[in-house]
Every structure is written in structure tokens, then in C-alpha cells.
Amino acid sequence: MSVTYRPVGWTRSKIVYDAVLLAGVALYLIGFMRFAPRTRLPGTLLDDQSLAIRAYGTCAFLLLTLVLMIGPLARLDARFLPLLYNRRHFGVITCIVAASHLIAVFDWYYAYSPLSPWVALFATDAAYGDLRGFPFIPLGLAAFLILLVLAATSHDFWLNFLTPPVWKSLHMSIYAAYALAVGHVAFGALQDARNAGLPALVVGGSGMLLGLHLAAAWRERRRDRPAPASAAEPDWIVAGTVGDVPAGRGLIVPLADGSSVAIFREDGALSAISNLCAHQNGPLGEGRLRDGCVVCPWHGYEYRLRDGCAPAPFTERVATYAIRLDGRTILLDPRPNPLGTATQPLAIPRETR
């Protein structure tokens, strides 16, 4: 992406990802429209328009829950990483489904309103002082507007234009959107729920999401303890042992300043580069090696082990680090080399492999 910007750089994995996701959304909507009427209580009516509103709304809530589950799942189990690669596509589709829900609401409730639908959304219910009847529509609209902003800025152009820290902070507002969506459902449709389906979706989904984030945070907390200083070299730290670095994979070493280093083992030698991808700070230490390059597990960015530079024609760079061996113990200089500095891989003696 440092060379040129295209609307979508389609690859086979992206096509398969989107096809599976769209098929899942279609199956959910068709299944909901077909089977939901059978769950209504005797003597109650459920018109087609209201059914469509519920179908789009529950689908959007389910998709948003799944989007937020991908991150902690990938932290807990690397088998979920493929879901992370194109998560922004997941978010855009979620926004489209949420927009369909909003359009269905406009079409059914405000089509013949003498007021503008946007005015009517806020004018029909303004009992903000009553907790039991608290207006739920503004909560849902605020959640949708956040999703719309995130979808509109999902392309790498905005990542580069806004800078990664600002872009990341902006997209963290998806958690605010989820909280607003929970409030929208809790003060709205959940008040009139006639079966356990919607409560199970809201309570069960948000409970699982919270549990996954807590589990991932606990695991990361244990992994993020800074490495101890070396007794022999006070300015260096003990990164681990040769046996801690799996062949073809990385050992992540936390530093005292909150950053981290990834040490890789390839062809009987060790190399150390920053663990943070220059694209979105993805964990390079969880990536795989290919042709002397580390492939970021988030979006596939590549960096050469010897100098931390992306192969031509790309221009991204990450820092390299100096390492040495003390027997089987790996010592790491936590001070990064200037960007683009080439380092010689550290050969592992046969007796210590």
C-alpha cells in the first residue's frame, strides 16, 4: 500500500472471505424471515415490514458481536488469525446490514410522516427522564453513525492520512458503538420480547464478548512482563534461551518502555526486529517466515529479517536489534538500531541447538 492506492486489492483470500461472509448473512436473513413467524405467540401479528426490521437489526447486532470477538480469539488461538486478515471487510458488511435496518425503519414508520424522518426519529420519543421508557432510537442512530464513519475510513489511505495512532484511536470507537447498540436493543426491542431468542442474543453475545476480552487480557498481561536485565551486561536484557525460539517462528520479548521485539530462528541463525508492524502495529512475532521475510499475521505486510525493510517496491521499515549468545541464553540490546540498519544473523553453535 506504500506504492499505490486502489479501492480494494482483491486476492483469492479476500474473495473467499467476502463470499463466505455474504452467504452467511443471506442464510441468516432468509432463515429469520422464514422461521421467526413460527415463534410468535398465538393471536399476535407480525407483518412483513416489522419482520424485515427485526431480521436486519438482529443480524447487524450479531455481526458486530462477531467482529469484536475476532481480536481476542486470535490472541488466544492462532487458528483464528485468518479471520483477522480481512476484518475490515467484516466491519463494512456489518455497516451495510445496519443501514438496511435503518432504511427499513424509515420505510415503515416514517414514510408518511409530515416531519422529516430524521426529525421524527428524535421528536416521537423524548422521555429522557424516564429510565423505563428511555428513548432507544438515538442510541441506535449514534451506533450506526459510528459504524458509518469507521466503514468510510477503513481504507489504508485514511490510515496513512490520519497516521496509525489517530486511525487506531478512531476505530477503537467500535466499542462505543457496541455499547450504544446494546442500549438500543435493551431499551427498545428487548422490552417487548416474547421469547428467549433476543435476550439470549444480547445477554449471551455480550457476555461471551466480555469473557473473551478478559481471557485475552489476562494472557497478554502475563506475556507482557518486561524481560529481566542481564547480570553480565547491565544494558542488555535476557530474552530467553535458544530453545524458546521455534524454527520458522518468533519469540516475542517485551521491553520496559511498552514496546516489544521479535526474535526469529531461520537456517540455524537468530535475528531480531521490532514486533510492531509499521502498518497497524500488528504482532510480527506471531507471523511466519517466507523467503527471509517476516509476514505480518494481520494483513500480510513483509519485512526482511536482515534489515527490517519491506521488499521493493514497498517502503515500510521496522527497527532491527542487536543480539548475542551467552551459552544457550539469548541477550538482547533493547536500544533499536536506526531504521534500515542491516544486521548479520547470529549463528547458533551446533552444541547449543
Image: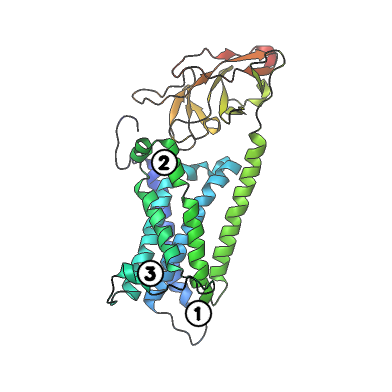
- Read off the residue under disc 1: 40
Amino acid beneath label 2: Trp
Q: Which quadrant holds residue 258?
A: top right
Q: Residues within 10 Å of mark 2 (few under 14, many from 20)?
A: some
Q: Tell me which label, 3 or 1, sits earlier in the chain.
A: 1
Marks 3 and 1, Cα distance to the nearest angstrom? 29 Å
Kindly identify which numbered label has been placed on residue 167: 2
- Read off the residue under disc 3: 122
Q: Residue 125 in the image: x percent, y percent?
A: 42, 74
Q: Secondary structure at mark 1?
A: loop
Q: Are marks 3 and 1 in contact (CB under 8 Å)?
A: no
Q: Which quadrant holds residue 53?
A: bottom left
Left/right of residue 129 with respect to residue 18 in the rendered view = right
Residue depicted at 38% across the width and 75% down the height: 124
Q: Is residue 250 above or below residue 215?
A: above
Q: Residues within 10 Å of mark 1 (few under 14, many from 20)?
A: some
Q: Residue furthest front?
A: 129
Q: Secondary structure at mark 2?
A: helix
Q: Secondary structure at mark 3?
A: helix
Q: Residue 309 in the image: x percent, y percent?
A: 43, 22
Q: Which quadrant holds residue 23?
A: bottom left
Residue depicted at 48% across the width and 61% down the height: 181
Amino acid beneath label 3: Phe
Left/right of residue 7 with respect to residue 264 in the rendered view = left
Q: Is residue 26 visible?
A: no
Marks 1 and 2, Cα distance to the nearest angstrom? 44 Å
Q: Tell me which label, 1 or 2, sits earlier in the chain.
A: 1
Marks 2 and 3, Cα distance to the nearest angstrom? 30 Å
Q: Residue 54 in the image: x percent, y percent?
A: 44, 70
